Image (cartoon, grey):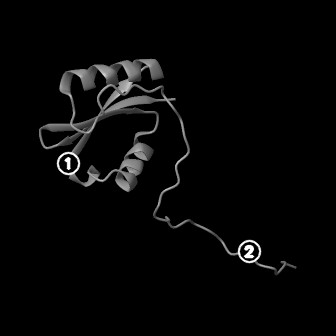
Amino acid sequence: MNFTVYIARLDDRILYVGATSDLGQRIAIHADLTPWWHTVTSVESIPARSPEDAAETERRLIAEYRPEHNKDGVTRRYARYAYTPRTPRPAASRKASNRRSV
């Protein structure tokens, strides 16, 4: 499993620092649920060796840069969770046929 620390920026300003095992899914979650996410102009990713390494790097970067959208004093354990987007996404499907080939 890959672990990543990510830095969301508005131009040169750091807005948020986070850690995840699935950056694409995490960005999709932010896009659906985070009111300020539309202001993000770039996301930088930093690979981590383990969940503990990701959490430590995240804590260090938050302490160093004090991003405006990270909550002060919030520490969390690395969690994995399922996500269902608010906006339905089209799914590929085939119609089943009742006809049998002879």
Residue drawn at x 81%, y 80% is 98
Q: Residue furthest front?
A: 73
Q: Residue furthest left?
A: 12
**53 is higher (above) or lower (below) than 88:** above
Foreground residue among 89 and 72: 72
Residue drawn at x 53%, y 54% is 84
Q: Secondary structure at mark 1?
A: loop
**Left or right of residue 22, residue 101 in this image:** right
Q: Which residue is mark 1?
A: 41
**69 is higher (above) or lower (below) than 63:** below
Residue 64 in the image, given as x and y percentages of width and height: 20, 21
In the rendered image, which quarter is residue 4 located in? top left
Badge 2 or badge 1: first in the primary sequence: 1
Residue 71 in the image, given as x and y percentages of width and height: 30, 33
Mark 2–mark 1 CB contact (< 8 Å):
no
Residue 35 in the image, given as x and y percentages of width and height: 30, 53
In the rendered image, which quarter is residue 46 located in? top left
For label 2, the crowd category at 10 Å Cα-Cα, with few meaning under 14, some 14 to 19 and many 20 or more, is few
> Comparing marks 2 and 1, which lies closer to the viewer?
1
Q: Which residue is mark 2?
A: 96
